[in-house]
Amino acid sequence: MSGIHFKSPHLALILGAILTLAFSIRVGVRLAFGKDGFWTSSSSIYWKLADNIVSGDGFCIQIAFGFGNTCAWLPPVYPLFLTLPVLLGGNYLFIVVPQALLGAGTALCAFMIGRHIFNASVGILACAIAAFYPYYVMHDTALQETGMVTFCTALAMWLLLRASKLNRNIDWFLAGVALGTIPLIRASVASAVGVGLVWCAVWGASGNYLERLRKSLVLLLAVASVTGPWLMRTYHLTGAPVFSSQTGYALWMGNNARTLSHYPKESIDLSRNEAWVNLSETDRAGLQQLPNNEIVRSNSFAHRAVAYMRENPLLVLQGMFRKLDAAFSWRLNPSREPLAQAAYSIAYVPVAILGVVGMLLARGRREVILIVMLFIAFICVTAVFWAHTVHRSYLDVYLIVFAASAVERLWGPYRVS
């Protein structure tokens, strides 16, 4: 179906109840942990950047190791979202409530994707699982962009599936708008844009190759209209049209002699700090004395990472498997207290197993190809760079959908249409 249209009189009530509970439990859990718990576990760099924007300093912020101000370090959407709470005095509920709505929106997207690929029963079950998925319940309202990028990516995937069915220019354009927003929230998910474009050109759009090309160009135009202003800004400031100026830095974090000294059990930031300390004084001084240009600095770190990869191919290969193991592990990383670990494992393990089973059972369908391509893109980025659990979590909604489809095969006699 192209939109929310219910054949069963009870389906709307069921969906509404699940989404209401999804919102309520996210707000309730965050209230239970309280204001202090919220700010203690927050990513302060986002709040600082939002405060800088409100203060008139724009997107510029000072980072570690005495590198001075950077003005393209983070993509703009999430810091801009935080500017309203900053203006309203910093009450954490002004962050929690809208992000809880996005979390409920993710559950709705799980319903829409599940119904589009399979049927309404799969959609309802996927929606319910996403609504109460422990990792989402906690992280959707944290001071980080995880919940936002999860929702936006799920929305983009559903809009792509919808556009593929209707094959109208306006639908491909809307899908492109959502797709283009993704790297403006988290730069490491920029590969989703390529996934959407390739899928549209090869599998998604119908018609001959010229028609598919036209639809792909409509999709690309929409992506460009969203990302263009930010890319033009970063080009003006740094000399390169980038979503984030930390790409080379991130590559070095994931590819140096100390990468696995703390990561993945502990934060990779600890490994990064150790790698920095282990540089010679001459190397550290050289990096700090580079021209105050973010791209020059990023390229310098990238060159170091590439040199390490060329000199240590076996260690790099081993590291790739460690990174992928960390990203898809049944254990949280960085590691957390036993209760959080238990809640995560109990939910994630069956979802992951049943999700893979569901993908295999539905293999060959063009809708499934889109989701599989999204996983492959993440795997490639993670193998080259690195990832913690939080970086993979935006993919869990698709595991949930396919897990629901596997369960629905046993639940078929009670199917809702």
Image (cartoon, helix red, strand yellow):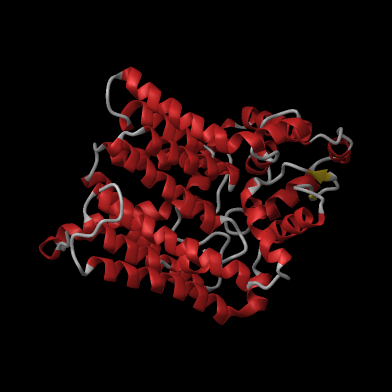
Front position in the image: 327 or 120: 120
The image shows residue 61, relative to residue 334, as above or below, that is above
Residue 2 visible in image:
yes
Q: Quadrant of residue 40?
A: bottom right
At a point 77% along the width and 43% down the height, the residue shown is: 71
Residue drawn at the location 51% of the way across and 56% of the way down: 389
In the rendered image, the vertical position of residue 202 relative to residue 17, given as above or below: above
Q: Position of residue 74 (x, y in %)?
A: 68, 46
Q: Is residue 98 above or below residue 205?
A: below
Horizontal side, residue 286 vs residue 218: left or right: right
Left or right: 400 as drawn, with respect to 229: left
Front one among 407 and 327: 407
The residue that appears at 41% across and 43% down in the rendered structure is: 375
User: Is residue 318 in view from this perspective?
Assistant: no
Residue 329 location (% of width, % of height): 45, 55
- Image position, residue 322 (x, y; %): 52, 47
